[in-house]
Image (cartoon, coloured by chain):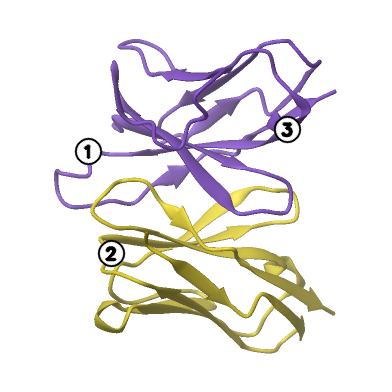
Chain colours: A purple, B yellow
Amino acid sequence: NAGVMQNPRHLVRRRGQEARLRCSPMKGHSHVYWYRQLPEEGLKFMVYLQKENIIDESGMPKERFSAEFPKEGPSILRIQQVVRGDSAAYFCASSPDPRRGHNYEQYFGPGTRLTVT
Amino acid sequence: GIQVEQSPPDLILQEGANSTLRCNFSDSVNNLQWFHQNPWGQLINLFYIPSGTKQNGRLSATTVATERYSLLYISSSQTTDSGVYFCAIAYNTDKLIFGTGTRLQVFP
């Protein structure tokens, strides 16, 4: 059973370009979470999605950031017009529906390290 | 909002020593997880432990939910245990709130 997949693992963008980060959840998982880790800091929640539905985006910056989890294909975190402050590690996690079976465990992918030059 | 505190912030050990890491949280939780972030940045699930005790090899964890703390025990530490250990919790929502971590360095 493959784990959570993220790609690319490393991404370099110049200021003003767009960054697209992809996340494929574990098989059987219908819930996806995105977290950001700034250098030398802990992880901070950004957004929580189900298929075709954003459940909670309270941690997402209001501008330039968007996320989707379409019916088919991976979840995408999109950052438009990147700035140097966007340089961070972006982690994706997945879980089964937490409300079935009361298992709330989240499984994390290897992360995408974004560097903005 | 809910608070998560980890202690100690830094820990330096010699190989073979034992250690205890602590996580305090300010409210009841339905999810508590321990992670190890290795020096390459990879985040590894150690335990899903909203309550009770679990063991996995040299590692074990205990969460006392009524007293709002969790402990991670590392026995006979090895250099490969080096990295940052995070505690993360969720309370009536699904988003995890991470502590600031304990940075562990194990020397041969």
Q: Are marks 2 and 1 in contact (CB under 8 Å)?
A: no
Residue in the image at 78% along x and 28% along y: A84
A21 to the left or right of B71: right
Answer whether residue B62 is visible to the viewer in this image: no
Query: Which residue was labeled with disc 3?
Result: A85
**How far across and how far down the image is residue B26, in percent?**
36, 72
User: Closer to the observer: label 3 or label 2?
Assistant: 3
The secondary structure type at the circle numbered 1 is loop
- Residue at 40 percent across and 51 percent down: it is B96
* Front in this rendered view, residue A6 or A50: A50
Q: Is residue A95 above or below residue B46?
A: above
Do the residues bearing badges 1 and 3 touch, measured as CB atoms within 8 Å?
no
Q: Which mark is residue A97?
A: 1
Query: Mark 2 is on which residue type?
Result: Val
Q: Chain of mark 1?
A: A
Q: Is residue B97 above or below residue B9?
A: above
- Neighbour tally class for label 2: few under 14, some 14-19, many 20 plus, Cα within 10 Å: some
- State the separation of the CA atoms marked 1 and 3: 33 Å
Name the spot of residue A14 as percent of width and height, x first.
81, 15
| Residue A99 visible | yes
* Quadrant assignment, res A80: top right
What's the residue type where badge 3 is placed? Gly
Cα gap from disc 3 to disc 2, whole angstroms: 32 Å
Q: What residue is disc 2 on?
A: B29
Answer with mark 1 or mark 3, whichever residue precedes in sequence.
Answer: 3
**Residue closer to the observer: B31 or A56:** A56
Q: Secondary structure at mark 2?
A: loop
Q: Residue furthest left?
A: A100
The dot on residue A36 is: none
Residue at 66 percent across and 75 percent down: it is: B9
x 56%, y 28%: residue: A6
